[in-house]
Image (spheres, rainbow, N blue to C red):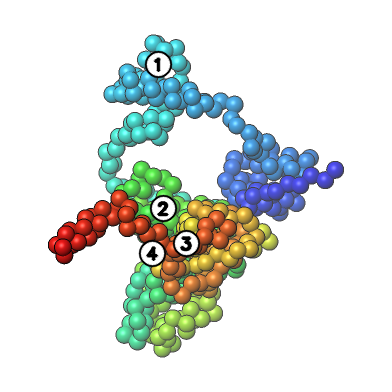
């Protein structure tokens, strides 16, 4: 009997890494860095895959409810006790009183988490420590971490417009893995940069970057709502790349120093070549400048393995979807969707069942095409030239008939005033 197993994208990547480990292409230590688990856990997964095949990559607890998970009734009971008796207690004292007076034994840290989640307790802010920058050791393998940044500068001096250089530097070797000029450091240029990077090198295990709005939501509300993420964070989560946000420029000092070096060296090289356009500059970077620069300043890493994650077939099919700007919209009652002051009419025949008020995802692809997706199915639609008019007094032939308006007779009580006026006129004429 054949068993059908549907792996997630991360499980598929994990299976490929374990296969490399079984074939002795990489070591246990290198596999643990690529997957993000301990060396001992890698050995367990390797043994499972060797004995069970691809089934061994799937976690046995998938789809099961945790054995130690408390029920919602139990949590609501604790919250009711807290609201009634211990509303000004801290989590530690409240846990002690629940055990002492109500025979409910819970840990103080679990209770703290429940109270914070239900807005009963606020996390106390800690004092900021004195700033001191500690030297950090390089990563061991090429492709383990990339430091990424955008640098606005007059790269063409007075010969051209001011633009931005998107730069990725490998932490282990110090080489420029990719550099590209673009108009700005927005979502679309960054998406194009990393899509090209992945197709050329594969994706790194980690990316070290700053708190620019493209990479991190810096609004105050994001501190309370951890689910708020940027388009870039969402894309990298889907691919399986870990993002590390630097709190100071010194934290990602390699790429910062590289930018300073390029603002000196590269500007002069562009001047010598008389390059004044972004297209010419990108061609010069890829073909001439970066190979020579890396050969001169590269550092030998501690380990020889390349930890870039190669793009498999499943990920390759989804790259255009992942690197798209995605927004959610509601389906209106007339099966239209409004997005950026445009109306899209959904067709009657669709590849999946569609209802009013369904939440759909609108994808703006890098080629400027727009697709509407419900779950994993793309919906059929066409653009409307203007906003559809609301239909009023719709005739329903099967239920109603069009009748002439009813006019009451002259002697009807509703027309009493009119009859009274006629009688007065008659008396006057006499």
Question: Left of 333 or right of it: where is 407?
Answer: left
Q: Residue at x 55, y 64 (%)?
A: 346
Question: Left of 358 or right of it: where is 116?
Answer: left
Q: Say what secondary structure mark 2 lies in.
A: strand
Mark 3 or mark 4, which has the lower sequence index?
A: 4
Q: CA distance from mark 1 to mark 2?
A: 40 Å
Q: Residue at x 58, y 55 (%)?
A: 354
Question: Left of 117 or right of it: where is 88?
Answer: left
Disc 4 packing (10 Å; few <14; some 14–19; many ≥20)? few
Q: Say what secondary structure mark 3 lies in.
A: loop
Mark 1 or mark 2, which has the lower sequence index?
A: 1
Q: Which mark is residue 257?
A: 4
Quarter containing the C terminus: bottom left
Q: How many marks?
A: 4
Q: Residue furthest front?
A: 430
Q: Position of residue 289 (x, y in %)?
A: 49, 77
The residue under label 1 is 98
The residue under label 2 is 245
């Amino acid at each position: 009997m054949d068993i059908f197993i549907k792996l997630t994208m991360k499980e598929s990547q994990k299976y490929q890494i374990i296969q490399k480990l079984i074939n002795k292409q990489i070591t246990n230590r290198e596999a643990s860095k690529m997957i993000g688990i301990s060396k001992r856990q890698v050995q367990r997964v390797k043994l499972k895959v060797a004995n069970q095949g691809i089934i061994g990559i799937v976690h046995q607890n998938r789809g099961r409810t945790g054995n130690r998970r408390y029920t919602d009734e139990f949590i609501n009971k604790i919250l009711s006790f807290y609201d009634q008796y211990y509303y000004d207690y801290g989590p530690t004292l409240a846990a002690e009183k629940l055990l002492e007076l109500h025979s409910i034994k819970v840990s103080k840290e679990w209770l703290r988490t429940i109270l914070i989640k239900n807005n009963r307790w606020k996390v106390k802010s800690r004092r900021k420590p004195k700033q001191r920058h500690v030297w950090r050791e390089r990563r061991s393998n090429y492709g383990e971490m990339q430091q990424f940044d955008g640098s606005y500068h007059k790269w063409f001096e007075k010969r051209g417009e001011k633009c931005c250089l998107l730069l990725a530097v490998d932490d282990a070797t110090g080489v420029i893995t990719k550099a590209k000029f673009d108009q700005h450091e927005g979502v679309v240029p960054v998406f194009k940069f990393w899509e090209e990077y992945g197709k050329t090198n594969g994706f790194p295990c980690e990316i070290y970057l700053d708190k620019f709005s493209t990479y991190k939501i810096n609004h105050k509300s994001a501190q309370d709502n951890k689910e708020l993420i940027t388009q870039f964070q969402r894309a990298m989560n889907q691919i399986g790349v870990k993002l590390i946000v630097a709190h100071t420029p010194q934290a990602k000092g390699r790429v910062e120093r590289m930018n300073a070096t390029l603002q000196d060296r590269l500007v002069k090289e562009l001047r010598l070549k008389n390059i004044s356009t972004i297209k010419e500059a990108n061609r010069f970077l890829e073909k001439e400048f970066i190979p020579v620069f890396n050969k001169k300043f590269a550092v030998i890493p501690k380990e020889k393995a390349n930890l870039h994650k190669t793009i498999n077939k499943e990920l390759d099919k989804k790259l255009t979807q992942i690197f798209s700007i995605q927004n959610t919209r509601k389906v209106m009652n007339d099966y239209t969707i409004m997005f950026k002051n445009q109306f899209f009419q959904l067709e009657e025949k669709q590849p999946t069942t569609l209802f009013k008020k369904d939440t759909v995802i609108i994808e703006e692809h890098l080629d400027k095409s727009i697709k509407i997706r419900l779950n994993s199915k793309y919906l059929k639609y066409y653009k409307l030239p203007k906003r559809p008019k609301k239909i009023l007094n719709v005739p329903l032939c099967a239920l109603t008939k069009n009748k002439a308006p009813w006019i009451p007779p002259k002697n009807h009580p509703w027309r009493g005033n009119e009859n009274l006026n006629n009688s007065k006129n008659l008396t006057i004429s006499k």
